[in-house]
Image (cartoon, rainbow, N blue to C red):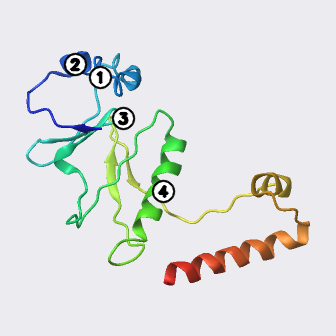
Amino acid sequence: MFVTEVKKFRADELMEFYKSDLKLKKFLHIIENSHVFPAIYDHNRTVLSLPPIINGAHSAINLKTKNVFIECTATDLTKAKIVLNTMVTMFSMYCERKFEVEPVEVIYPDGKSCLYPDLSVYSMEVPLSYIIDTVGVSLEADEGGGMVTYVLALLFCWSEN
């Protein structure tokens, strides 16, 4: 859904307006009782998005689009980071310079700032049983590492083509 309205609304009026929209009203509960509403706008203060409710038609992607800003909003920061990293990395394979991503500084109300997406490498330990259950392939412990290396090599070769 896109914001196509040209009428000016106060935030509370906009929430009331969207309550009559069959597709949007089911998401309003996420922010409607908040004392502030998230809004992404450009340097002219044109609203581009009211996350997580609606995106703006003003900034919709078309065949001539050269630069894309990918934002992710959620009530759980860990889940938001995972979704953002997944979306950014998958989308970046279509960039003119493959896999090039520009970070954005997010400044929180308490003054803390972070760069997103955070695509730093990290290690994690995962039980082999979890991998077997998730992937559906039976592996012995000594086969797991080799299989991961094989899959990563396939992905690298695929991304180069």
Dot 3 alpha-carbon crowd within 10 angstroms: few under 14, some 14 to 19, many 20 or more: some
- Frontmost of labels 1 and 2 is 1
Q: Quadrant of residue 30?
A: top left
Dot 1 alpha-carbon crowd within 10 angstroms: few under 14, some 14 to 19, many 20 or more: few
Dot 4 lies on which element? Answer: helix
Q: Which residue is mark 2?
A: 17
Q: Which residue is mark 1?
A: 21
Q: CA distance from mark 3 to mark 1?
A: 15 Å
Tell me the kind of residue under disc 4. Answer: Asn
Tell me the kind of residue under disc 3. Answer: Pro
Q: Residue 6, image x and y in percent?
A: 9, 33
Dot 2 lies on which element? Answer: helix
Q: Which residue is mark 3?
A: 52
Q: CA distance from mark 2 to mark 3?
A: 16 Å
Q: Which residue is mark 4?
A: 85
Give the mark nearer the N terminus: 3 vs 4. Answer: 3
Q: CA distance from mark 2 to mark 4?
A: 33 Å
Give the mark nearer the N terminus: 4 vs 1. Answer: 1
